[in-house]
Amino acid sequence: TDVNGDAAEPLFEWLKAEAPGLLGLKRVKWNFEKWLVGRDGKVKGRWASPTKAESLESPILDELRKGAAKSGL
């Protein structure tokens, strides 16, 4: 899957536009960058490749709670 350049997949073009990287750059710097997309379809965060998945537990759970609260669950 291409994530940068003319052949980049539309999903990655959208993610990069919604949450630019360091210094506002709209490119994926390295493998394993992470994005969190909420139930509302908006990008809630972007993390660089060195970020450990375990450290994203809180933002993910926060987004899940927001969605559950809106749906009455």
Image (cartoon, grey):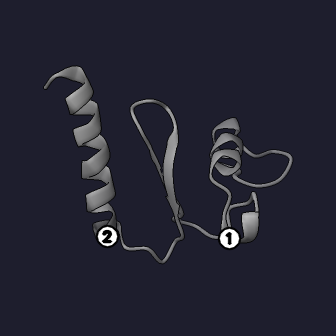
Quadrant containing the C terminus is top left
Q: Which residue is mark 2?
A: 55
Q: Is residue 43 left or right of residue 29?
A: left
Give residue 7's position: percent from left, percent from top. 81, 45
Q: Residue flagged by tag 2: what amino acid is it? A: Ser
Residue at x 49%, y 32% (from the top left corner): 41
Label disc, if present, on residue 45 of the rendered structure: none
Contact, mark 2 vs mark 1 (Cβ under 8 Å): no
- In the image, 55 versus 67, the foreground residue is 67
Give residue 53's position: percent from left, percent from top. 34, 66
Relative to 8, does residue 27 appear above or below in the rendering?
below
Q: Secondary structure at mark 1?
A: helix
Give residue 17's position: percent from left, percent from top. 71, 47
Give residue 54's position: percent from left, percent from top. 28, 68
Q: Earlier along the polypeptide chain: callout 2 or callout 1? A: 1
Q: Which residue is mark 1?
A: 22
